[in-house]
Image (cartoon, rainbow, N blue to C red):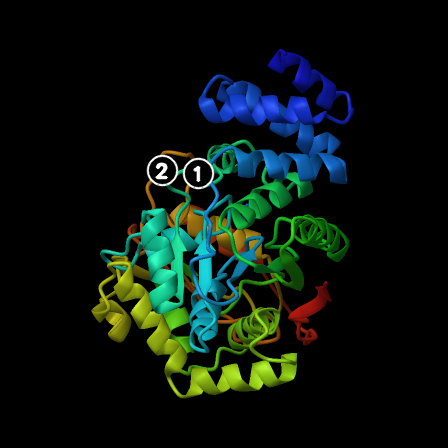
Amino acid sequence: MRMVDVIEKKRNGQALSKEEINFFIDGYTKGDIPDYQASALLMAVYFQGMTAEETALLTQAMVDSGETIDLSSIKGHKVDKHSTGGVGDKISFITGPIVASVGVPVAKMSGRGLGHTGGTIDKLESVEGFNVEITKEEFIENVNKYKLAVAGQTGNLAPADKKLYSLRDVTATVDSIPLIAGSIMSKKLASGADSIVLDVKTGSGAFMKTLEESEALAREMVQIGNNLGRKTIAVISDMNQPLGYEIGNANEIKEAAEVLKGKRVDDLRHLALELAAHMTVLAEVFDTYEEAYAKLEENVDNGKAFEAFRTFIHAQGGNTEMIDDLSLLPKAAFDIEVPAANSGYVNSIDAASVGIAAMHLGAGRATKEDQIDFGVGISLQKKIGDYVEKGEPLVILHSQEQNPQASIAKIKEAYSVTEEKPEKPTLIYKVIK
Ligand code: URA
């Protein structure tokens, strides 16, 4: 089989066979197929799509590209949560500890930043000493002991996704339904959880911009999960503005910790509790969503969820002093206000532009080799529906440069301020079972 023929077939809009998909995944993982041919196929998939059957085959091939984790030695029903990626999405750091606080084991395998969105692993590494490169044995032991562990895609779990993920990031092939579904579900299936809750983002800051596309992605992933024996549901949630107020790495950890300490950042707290409630119902710890939500909310308010977060950070080598005293987290040299050009209500915030502004500051990668700067980021001062006076700050940029022109321009582009007050955006659109 020749890779050029596989590329041509997909470029011409035909469905690939199991053998062709396996040939590509196997060859690319081993290094026999070069990046340029993989990039060409990714772009062909981007434009031509894949059938549900091809997507399922792609997912299975990516699972089979490495090892799978057998979590059967962990007592209880293991749940996992995954977001399709957004801006300011620090929900995993809130949801994971909340679920762990009621004794449900959370075994989470995560990725790094992709495109304009941040990654769970990069954010966690902003806590000094935090180690995501744990072995399979340590991962299992930590979930068993502490009910929560997060592993990077090290070792040999879905290595095909690991390589493709960073290639997609720099070849403009991220926002494709089959590629996202395959990427997420291969990681989820390889890491062995019994149930999976997917947070599928929709809107300007999501890879899927419309509710229709997001729903199609959600249905595809739910079907793959359920067909392969994992109870899977998807919550479709809003990404028409960043989640919460903080974007970056250290400052997202800070905001997550604040919510776990009881701070009422409404969208963050509610979405985290919603996802956690579904996870614990799937784990059969609670009978109903309402009962789960109430009990989990209690654990945020009584500090048990924060304690679970602290334990998790400690167990993976992180410096917990930084979590107790959030001012110790990495910080950039300059805080720069970006003022509103006119008075009025914030009508929209293009979340992708805010994500790109953060990337220009150094919070994300433009090429595979780029290093993340943990201390840079953006603190929103105004969100949709807020009133702002001309000259008041819309955001504060945390920058290592005194005049980060590119980021300032992106923020100005992202915010629209109008005379009429807009409606508050919906946070949760649908649950797909
Ligand atoms: N998250 C992933 O793990 N993969 C994607 O392709 C997008 C978001």
- State how far apart marks 2 and 1 are (Cα): 7 Å
**Residue name at image x 63 percent, y 13 percent:** 4
Is 372 situated above or below 164? below
Q: Position of residue 212 (x, y in %)?
A: 77, 54
Q: Label 1's element?
A: loop
Mark on residue 196? none
Is residue 431 visible in the rendered image? The answer is yes
Q: Which residue is mark 2?
A: 370
**Residue name at image x 37 percent, y 51 percent:** 122
Q: Which residue is mark 1?
A: 366
Q: Are marks 2 and 1 in contact (CB under 8 Å)?
A: yes
User: Would you identify the image quadrant in which residue 294 lies?
Assistant: bottom right
Give amino acid for label 1. Answer: Ala
Is 302 on the left or on the right of 374, as rendered?
right
The N terminus: image quadrant: top right
**Residue name at image x 61 percent, y 85 percent:** 291
Q: Residues within 10 Å of mark 1 (few under 14, many from 20)?
A: some
